[in-house]
Amino acid sequence: MRTIPEVVAHAATEFADREALADSDGVRWTFRELGEQVDRCAAALIAAGLAPGDRVALWAPNSRRFVVAALGAVRAGAILVPVSTRFKGEEAAWILRKSGAALLMVENGFLGNDYLAMLAAAGAVPPMVRLDEGWDEFLASGAAPPTVTVRPGDPADMFFTSGTTGRPKGVLAAHGQDIRVFQAWSDGVGLRSGDRYLIVNPMSHTFGYKAGVLACLLRGATMVPMPVFDVSQVLARIEAERITVLPGPPTLYASLLDRRAGHDLSSLRLAVTGAATVPVRLIERMRAELFDEVVIAYGLTESCGTVTVGDPRTEPELMARTVGTAIEGTEVIVADPATGEPVKPGERGEVLVRGYNVMLGYFEDPAATAEAVDADGWLHTGDVGVLDADGNLSITDRLKDMYISGGFNVYPAEVEQVITRHPAVSEAAVVGVADPDGRLGEVGCAYVIVRPGAAGVTEQDIIGFCRERLAGYKVPRFARFASSLPRNASGKVLKYELRATT
């Protein structure tokens, strides 16, 4: 299996009568039925004039319709361009224009959002197919089963970068890359045939689509899509569907642990998470109260979504500091950002990646591609990390998030790890801000979310806790309490928004 259509066809025969998908509205399909739906969608798209290599944008929440639309588009030879359901009209319009999308497949009205009106206001109304009305009629409009053949090296998808700084860029990945990367990911995390996988991560992001939909197809696991993350609904869905696998950002598990009382979550087996900061205490609680296996992984859009995968047997202290080792057949080094030369084990530098997981490039942006991927094929991630002697990678921060206080480099993730050890703290994010005294250049400002029921913690409590555990230049000058942190669709904290409010 070297292309996505081959994976769909294989799943339809190998796992034919097993349950492939259980949607939130009660619709259930076997793998054979899912394969038939994908073929119908591809045939309808071809009948509508779609040609191989055309870009098809998809603006819709997690559901069976998203799965069929996405897989149908690549089955027809098109390049899938997912659009985040969080986007407003101008953001979506920019992606449609940048990608040159020939068609938009859209579910209008999700969470009360009138996407069509947003696009009209932004002056972007491309040819479109509605998933929320007329969808069955569209699927019936195709002719014979599609005969389009795609090759492993053909582009399969164009996911746009998260856009935490500047305009997002379209990242092209090929069929063969996607398949090989998520075979390695599935092997590494231990996804099994028969697992029941709650896909809460947005399918418009690589974590939801590639590590969700594609991984389930490769392994014969059941997809259980959820359109939005709501703690009460997730708890009920885990119980009702006997969910075994639940990947997500650390904040998801913190929410479940705080609200799980009264729910039978005994079916849970595997959690897959990742972030610059995964608190040790959170990992300990996840293992003790929810999961037999917890895996930390690391990736970025430009690496097809995966760079490293950890070992579920790793002790919590090490797991909280590392994100595992490079997936099979790829290389990871840590290099001096100024010279590009590898640093010694245990020393900080920029994380570089080389192998089949490195993107084809940024769409119609050769200059940005050359800046990201050097002449020797190394992808410069922009992440600060450390490799130990055994090849375990630690992500200590983003290069752009590091700040200098009194001449010393401060890596916010290190400070966040300390703050989240405070028994009253659920989450924390640290940013560098101008020193009001003008002496140190920048100082730290910590944004803190307190655990439910842990009232009474003060700014001085947080600062004092850090002072006992960190060198003076790393101790935040300020601590601000918040009910939530601004995040993008993939769960990353938008630190530029925090800086803007400081």
Image (cartoon, rainbow, N blue to C red):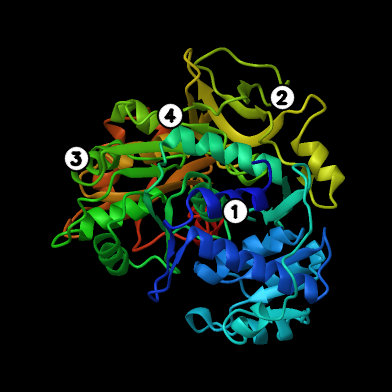
Residues at discs 3 and 2 in contact (Cβ within 8 Å) = no
Residue marked by disc 4: 322
Residue 391 is left or right of residue 420, and the answer is right
Residues at discs 3 and 1 in contact (Cβ within 8 Å) = no
Which residue type does callout 4 highlight? Thr
Position above or below: 127 against 337: below
Which residue type does callout 2 highlight? Ala
The answer to whether residue 479 of the structure is visible from this angle is no
Position above or below: 60 against 314: below
Q: Which of marks 1 and 4 is in front?
A: 1
Residue marked by disc 1: 8
**Residue 165: image x %, image y %?**
65, 53
Identity of the residue drawn at 60% across and 79% down: 131
Q: Which of marks 4 and 2 is in front?
A: 4
The quarter of the picture where residue 144 lies is bottom right
- Observer-nearest of 166 and 141: 141
Q: What element carries label 1?
A: helix
Identity of the residue drawn at 48% across and 39% down: 186
Label 4 – label 3 distance at C-alpha: 20 Å
**Residue 264: image x %, image y %?**
17, 58
